[in-house]
Amino acid sequence: MHKQPAVTEQTKQNFINGFIELNRKTPIEKITVKALSDRAGYNRATFYNYFTDVYQLYEDVELDVFDKMRAKIEDNMRNADDRYVYIENFTSLAFQYKASLEVIFRNPYSQHFVTQVKTYLIEYWIEKLELPKDDVTVKYQLNFYLSAMLATISHWLRNQNDMSITELAELLQTMSSQSPLSSILNRG
């Protein structure tokens, strides 16, 4: 057990930052523990105190981003007067965690992350927006909407920000108001 939580977190973050830097140019399959340890400024033994391999570190990147996004989305839902505010919040999260999301969406293992985000948001929205739990079409429509949103954000990240985050938020807002989601939310 690690005795200094602040040092432990900083060490883990240094490995994560090193991984993100390396993965920008090197596929995950070619990242070695030695290269990663050198980049983070530690030895291989320190790496193994925190992770079993590079793939576990990648999973930690996914989990860290997912947990931060989930907390932000829940906070925004509690404090939002407008149901569509989450679009701007979601895109701001994409910008805030841009480096980590670039790594996630670039890797062939990103489907796990996408599925995790969609599953969580579908269940959360059904509960918080009081949508019919037994209506299978609601789940299909939410899945369709979230797939499009995540694909759009992934496309934005891959294209080196060919539009600003504000333009992306406005585009998502427009598409959202014309999407199946708006018909779900406007059911009477």
Image: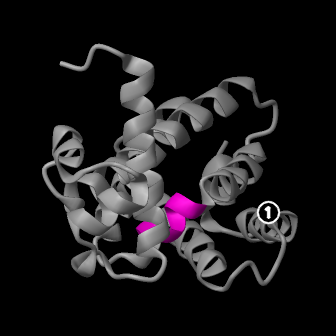
Left or right side of 70 for 26: left
Magenta run includes residue 23: no
Tell me which residue sits at (20%, 53%) in the image.
Answer: 44
Q: Position of residue 135 (x, y in %)?
A: 39, 50
Is 100 on the left-hand or right-hand side of 139? right
* Relative height, residue 101 to residue 135 (above, below): below
**Image point 31% across, 57% down: which residue?**
37
- As displayed, is residue 69 above or below residue 168? above
Mark 1, Cα crowd under 10 Å, few <14 / some 14-19 / many 20+, is many
Residue lying at 59% horizontally and 82% vertically, measured from the top left = 158
- Write down the region rendered in magenta: 99-104
Residue 45, given in percent of the width and then of the height, sits at: 16, 46
Q: Quadrant of the C terminus?
A: top right
Of residues 47 and 180, the one nearer the viewer is 47
Tag 1, which secondary structure? helix
What type is the residue that disc 1 sits on?
Answer: Ala
Does the magenta stretch mainly form a helix, a strand or a loop?
Answer: helix
Q: Quadrant of residue 40?
A: bottom left
From the viewer's perspective, is residue 59 above or below residue 108?
above
Quarter occupied by the N terminus: top left
> Mark 1 — residue?
169
Residue 119 visible in the current orientation: no
Give coordinates of residue 92: x percent, y percent: 73, 52
